[in-house]
């Protein structure tokens, strides 16, 4: 899978993410990146840092998340069909009801991840 965006596509994607991303305060006063329901399908997100982000119902179909840090992220109901999660950090992530059909999880760290009622089979 190639990760190539034209400068116009990159600018539109960045603008969309900035517009949709908000910071919510949790009980401790710490912020949490809220990217719920954002469409990241086919995006090149190699090495992205979404640790503890709210990615509820986000669309990652066919996205390249190689080496992504998704530790503790809320990926409940996220669509990860065909996503490349090679060597991704998913420790403690909530993947409940996530769609994982044909996702590549080779080398992914899944310690403590919640895969309860996740859908589909993975490539690895």
Image (cartoon, rainbow, N blue to C red):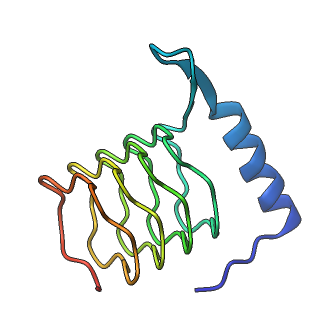
x, y percent for residue 2: 65, 85
Q: At which x and y percent is residue 64?
A: 55, 73
Nearest the viewer among 93 and 59 is 93
Is residue 51 shown left or right of residue 17? left
Furthest residue toward left: 117
Q: Quadrant of residue 34?
A: top right
Residue that appears at 39% across and 40% down:
56
Along the line of sight, the residue nearer the viewer: 24 or 40: 24
Q: Quadrant of the C terminus?
A: bottom left
Q: Is residue 82 left or right of residue 77?
A: right
- Where residue 50 appears, as percent x and y from the top left, is 56, 49
Residue occupying image coordinates x 37% and y 48%:
75
Above or below 64: residue 22: above
Q: Quadrant of the N terminus?
A: bottom right
| Relative to 98, residue 36 above or below | above
- Report how many numbered discs are placed on residues in the image: 0
Q: Is residue 8 above or below residue 28?
A: below
Residue occupying image coordinates x 74% and y 77%: 4
Left or right side of 71 for 31? right
Tell which of 62 and 48 is nearer to you.
Answer: 48
Residue 109 percent location from the top left of the image: 38, 69
- Picture residue at 13% right of the left edge, 52% below the top: 116
């Amino acid at each position: 899978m190639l990760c190539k965006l034209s400068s116009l596509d990159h600018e539109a994607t960045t603008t969309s993410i900035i517009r949709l991303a908000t910071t919510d305060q949790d009980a401790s006063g710490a912020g949490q990146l809220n990217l719920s329901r954002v469409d990241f399908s086919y995006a090149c997100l190699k090495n992205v840092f979404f640790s503890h982000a709210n990615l509820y119902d986000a669309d990652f179909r066919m996205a390249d998340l190689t080496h992504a840090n998704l530790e503790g992220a809320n990926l409940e109901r996220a669509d990860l069909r065909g996503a490349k999660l090679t060597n991704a950090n998913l420790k403690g992530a909530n993947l409940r009801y996530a769609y994982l059909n044909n996702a590549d999880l080779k080398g992914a760290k899944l310690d403590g991840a919640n895969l309860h009622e996740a859908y589909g089979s993975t490539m690895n």
